[in-house]
Amino acid sequence: MNCTTLRFVGRRAGQIASRSLGRAWASSLDSKSVAAFTELEHRNWQKAVSAYDKGFGALTRQCIPELLKAVQCGTGSQLLDVATGPGFVAEAAAKAGASVVAVDFSRKMLDLATQRLAGHDVKLLEADAASLPFEQESFDSVACSFGVLHLPVPEDFFAESLRILKPGGRLGFTVWAATPATEAMALVHEAVQLHGNPNVPLPDAPPFFRFADVDDTTSTLQSVGFAAVECKLIPMVWEFQDAADAFIAFRDGTGRTAALLAGQTSEQLKAIEEHITRGTEAKRTGPEGICRFQMPCVLTMAKKALV
Ligand SMILES: C[S@@+](CC[C@H](N)C(=O)[O-])C[C@H]1O[C@@H](n2cnc3c(N)ncnc32)[C@H](O)[C@@H]1O
């Protein structure tokens, strides 16, 4: 699917992010907000390690083959995996024969990645995506799987990626497609709207679905200096045997969604949990009786020019 098709899908799906909203956020986040959002994300990811691995691992792994293909990862290529989390992309890239470095700002995520990557030739480092500790032109490719939507100033990460990529190198990243296409996200939003407080005070941050918007993604990457931006919608499916696990994954295994849920009263949270569990149960289908959500993501690829 090319960018034109994706834009059409996004509009039909009633995307939350818009070009103007995204650009306004990018230019208006002051240093205090950046620090507050970074602190919230860091605190929650430090706590989320095992719930994220268990709850989201089988889902986010589904697009890794497309992500690695987009950045032309292969034998002998040098790949940086940013926001590696439990190390899923780093593991797949190492298995594909690449020489891999992986970074994350959560020490606890890196501890889990270290276990997963034992036996693989992968270097793991604690680092913020906005300030990558590498020389310029060090990598053939930079991959970031579901990390960009957690950054207060994604432009800083894009600029760092451009700096450390070799000429002709490629950046690839994935983010969630906007609601309602991402059905489980839509269910959480519905549950909070119906039973809780959607306006829990949280630090200012870019819109969660900002880079599901092809226009914003393309213009942002071009303004940083990338060329040949391409976006693609990738279908993915989130499966649960026990419907109660969907709520647990969101409550314990996320960044700002966990903060939104933590800001509810205990009565509100109970009602939200019941709504999400009922909604998940309603998705039970097929002969094996598994609950299934459509959870597409948007894969973006951009190139650093040769000269
Ligand atoms: C949704 S998880 C993605 C993990 C993994 N890449 C995957 O695809 O499943 C987001 C990860 O981004 C990391 N992260 C968030 N903000 C970061 C930042 N500013 N710098 C580096 N890592 C960050 C978190 O610690 C977490 O491990």
Image (spheres, rainbow, N blue to C red):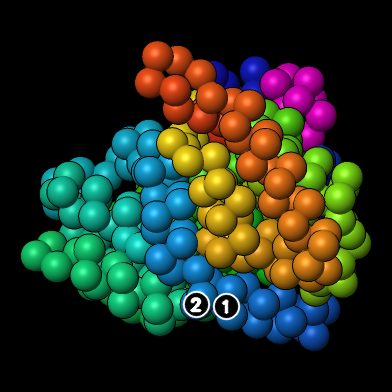
Kindly identify the residue that appears in the image at 56 percent across and 56 percent down.
248
Please give the label number shown on residue 46.
2
The answer to whether any part of residue 161 appears in the image is no
Residue range corresponding to the magenta coloring: 8-15
Magenta residue check for 10: yes
- The furthest residue to the left: 119
Q: Residues within 10 Å of mark 2 (few under 14, many from 20)?
A: some
Please give left or right for residue 77 compared with residue 66 in the image: left
Mark 2 belongs to which amino acid?
Gln
Magenta residue check for 11: yes
Residue 85 at what x, y percent from top left? Answer: 41, 64
Q: Main secondary structure of the magenta part?
A: helix
Please give the label number shown on residue 136.
none
Q: Quadrant of residue 164?
A: bottom left
Kindly identify the residue that appears in the image at 43 percent across and 36 percent down.
241
- Compared to 219, does 167 lie above or below? below
The answer to whether any part of residue 271 appears in the image is yes
The image quadrant where one finds the N terminus is: top right
User: Quick one: SS at disc 2?
Assistant: helix
Residue 236 at what x, y percent from top left? Answer: 48, 31
Residue at the disc numbered 1: 42
Mark 1 belongs to which amino acid?
His
Q: CA distance from mark 1 to mark 2?
A: 6 Å
Q: Is mark 2 within 8 Å of ligand 1?
A: yes
Q: Residues within 10 Å of mark 1 (few under 14, many from 20)?
A: some
Marks 2 and 1: in contact by CB < 8 Å?
A: yes
